[in-house]
Image (spheres, rainbow, N blue to C red):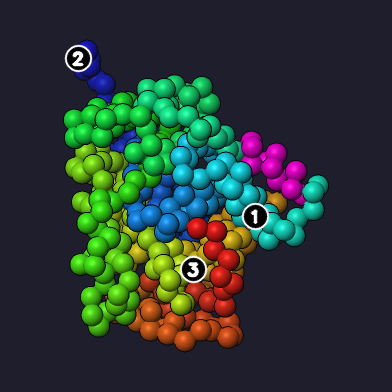
């Protein structure tokens, strides 16, 4: 079908008048780069066991408490029960074991209002998965991971499936996130931080080009995020690093992060990540702000970051971080769920 003349008049006039709506942020330092928008296919890439699913559940929950968004989740490698446990702990802002049965039920009902889960004891073809998504009429959907779909994992088939997913987001006015793994070569010894680097010997985050399945995912993604964590590091283990490496539409908000300057998310004892000392999850209508002091980012800080953490902290102390702000860093219990 050929569009008639005048098909873009409203958009052009709105753009000229500054009326194009921006995406949704969380009132945290990450908003400069990380912005949620409708009608998008977003890819999340990361090594196994770095906490991709945990981070995206936190992000979805923060979007729910700030903007009322609802989500439908397919997780092949995680149970819905464990996901609900983590969501309830983050939503309540207190250790799960400290909840009363009455509080637990109240938060369970609240999370069930925001989150629906697809049975992961079955395999689904892409078409069936999209049919299930359409029945829920959510704002957000998650396929975790892509290779759990019952479809040939070939170059041509990947393009076909991704095109179908993008068409779904347009028709349903929604956004789909896909968790993906890198190809095996990205985790080998030559992918470690080099000698004399602050994080020497630890696995580096994958590159966008390392994604399993190759170029179709890079080309079809609207936004592309890389999630990483320094597994086994004595002091950085609790920081999830997020690189935003592609933002297709910067006019509506968001932009790629600077090279080797990821957004840093502090695990915060499992009570919901903080970014720049700010807890983005609203509880009882209020956002919990830990630290508000800010300063401009200086590139030299990225080489200082791990040196700041060389010795375990026994007291709360202000430290500079790659977020370009002052973070409050306290000792962390090693009770990470991922």
Q: Which label sits in the foreground, 2 or 1?
A: 1
Magenta region, residue range: 103-113
Secondary structure mostly seen in the magenta stretch: helix
Classed neighbour count for the residue bearing mark 2: other residues with Cα under 10 Å, few (<14), some (14–19), many (≥20): few
Numbered circle sitting on residue 238: 3
Gap between marks 3 and 1 measured at Cα: 17 Å
Secondary structure at badge 2 equals loop
Confirm whether residue 237 shows in the render. Answer: yes
At horizontal 20% and vertical 14% (from top left) the residue drawn is 2
Q: How many marks?
A: 3
At horizontal 69% and vertical 56% (from top left) the residue drawn is 96
Residue under pointer 1: 89
- In the picture, measured across the screen, residue 14 lies left or right of residue 136, that is left
Gap between marks 2 and 3 measured at Cα: 53 Å
Find residue 75 and report its horizontal and vertical position in percent.
47, 40
Observer-nearest residue: 167 or 207? 207
Query: What quarter of the picture does the N terminus occupy?
Result: top left
At horizontal 46% and vertical 70% (from top left) the residue drawn is 237
Q: Earlier in the sequence, mark 2 or mark 3?
A: 2
Q: Earlier in the sequence, mark 2 or mark 1?
A: 2
Residue 175 drawn above or below residue 260: above
Residue under pointer 2: 2
Classed neighbour count for the residue bearing mark 1: other residues with Cα under 10 Å, few (<14), some (14–19), many (≥20): many
Find residue 52 and report its horizontal and vertical position in percent.
43, 53
Q: Is residue 112 magenta?
A: yes
Residue 222 drawn above or below residue 290: above
Residue 88 drawn above or below residue 139: below
Secondary structure at badge 1 equals helix
């Amino acid at each position: 079908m050929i569009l008639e003349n005048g098909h873009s008049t409203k958009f052009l006039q709105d753009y000229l008048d500054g009326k194009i709506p921006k995406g949704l942020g969380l009132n945290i330092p990450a908003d400069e780069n990380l912005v949620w928008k409708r009608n998008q296919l977003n890819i999340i890439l990361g090594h196994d066991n770095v906490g991709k699913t945990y981070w995206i559940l936190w992000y979805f929950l923060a979007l729910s408490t700030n903007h009322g968004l609802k989500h439908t989740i397919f997780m092949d490698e995680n149970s819905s029960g464990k996901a609900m446990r983590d969501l309830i702990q983050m939503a309540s802002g207190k250790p799960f074991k400290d909840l009363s049965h009455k509080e637990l039920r109240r938060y369970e009902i609240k999370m069930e209002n925001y989150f629906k889960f697809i049975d992961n004891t079955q395999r689904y073809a892409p078409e069936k998965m999209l049919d299930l998504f359409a029945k829920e009429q959510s704002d957000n959907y998650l396929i975790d991971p892509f290779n759990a779909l019952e479809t040939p994992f070939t170059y041509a088939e990947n393009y076909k499936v991704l095109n179908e997913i993008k068409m779904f987001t347009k028709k349903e006015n929604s956004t789909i996130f896909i968790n993906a793994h890198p190809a095996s070569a990205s985790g080998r010894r030559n992918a470690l931080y080099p000698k004399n680097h602050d994080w020497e010997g630890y696995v580096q985050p994958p590159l966008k080009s390392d994604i399993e399945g190759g170029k179709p995912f890079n080309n079809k993604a609207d936004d592309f995020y890389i999630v990483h964590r320094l597994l086994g590091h004595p002091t950085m283990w609790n920081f999830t690093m997020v690189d935003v490496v592609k933002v297709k539409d910067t006019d509506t908000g968001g932009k790629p992060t600077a090279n080797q300057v990821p957004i840093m998310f502090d695990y915060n004892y499992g009570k919901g990540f903080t970014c720049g000392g700010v807890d983005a999850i609203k509880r009882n209508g209020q956002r919990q702000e830990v630290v508000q002091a800010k300063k401009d980012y200086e590139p030299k800080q990225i080489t200082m970051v791990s040196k700041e953490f060389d010795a375990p902290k026994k007291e709360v102390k202000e430290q500079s971080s790659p977020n370009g702000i002052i973070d409050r860093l306290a000792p962390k219990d090693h009770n990470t769920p991922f």
